[in-house]
Image (cartoon, helix red, strand yellow):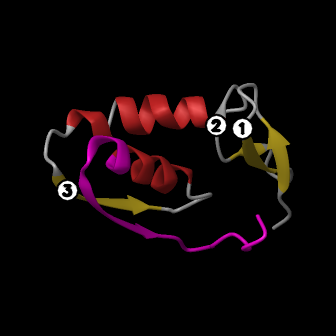
Amino acid sequence: MKLKVIETSDGSKTLKIPAWNEHYHSTHGAIAEAKHVYIKNGLDFVQSEDLSIFEMGFGTGLNAFLTYLNGLQNKRIINYYALENEPLPIEL
């Protein structure tokens, strides 16, 4: 599958699948979207200092990276597990 790296409105990058006209993240802001949906309205609701997360579909790893940063900032132990059927090439 051919992928194209594009810049989103917040300056972060995402991937586009031209054949499907689909993007991995919002073109309005990949990081902004992940912080709003995954962190603010997901991870931040959990008050535990020690938790486990399972994500079906690793994608670009953006959610995993933001989870790591959140764990460092909030001094939380987060066990993160993800399954990906079609991993991206390492250079992406």
Q: Amino acid at mark 2?
A: Ala
Q: Residues within 10 Å of mark 1 (few under 14, many from 20)?
A: some
Q: Position of residue 54 (x, y in %)?
A: 32, 62
Residue 30 got which mark?
Answer: 2
Q: Secondary structure at mark 1?
A: loop
Residue bearing mark 1 = 12
Q: Is residue 8 part of the magenta span, yes or no?
A: no
Taking 44 as reference, is 66 left or right? right
Work out whether mark 1 precedes mark 3 in sequence or the reverse, and give the earlier one: 1
Residue bearing mark 3 = 51
Q: Secondary structure at mark 3?
A: strand
Q: Secondary structure at mark 2?
A: helix
Q: Which residues are the magenta region?
A: 71-92
Quadrant where the C terminus sits is bottom right
Q: Residues within 10 Å of mark 3 (few under 14, many from 20)?
A: few
Q: Position of residue 30 (x, y in %)?
A: 64, 37
The answer to the question of whether label 2 and label 1 lie on touching residues, with beta carbons closer than 8 A, is yes
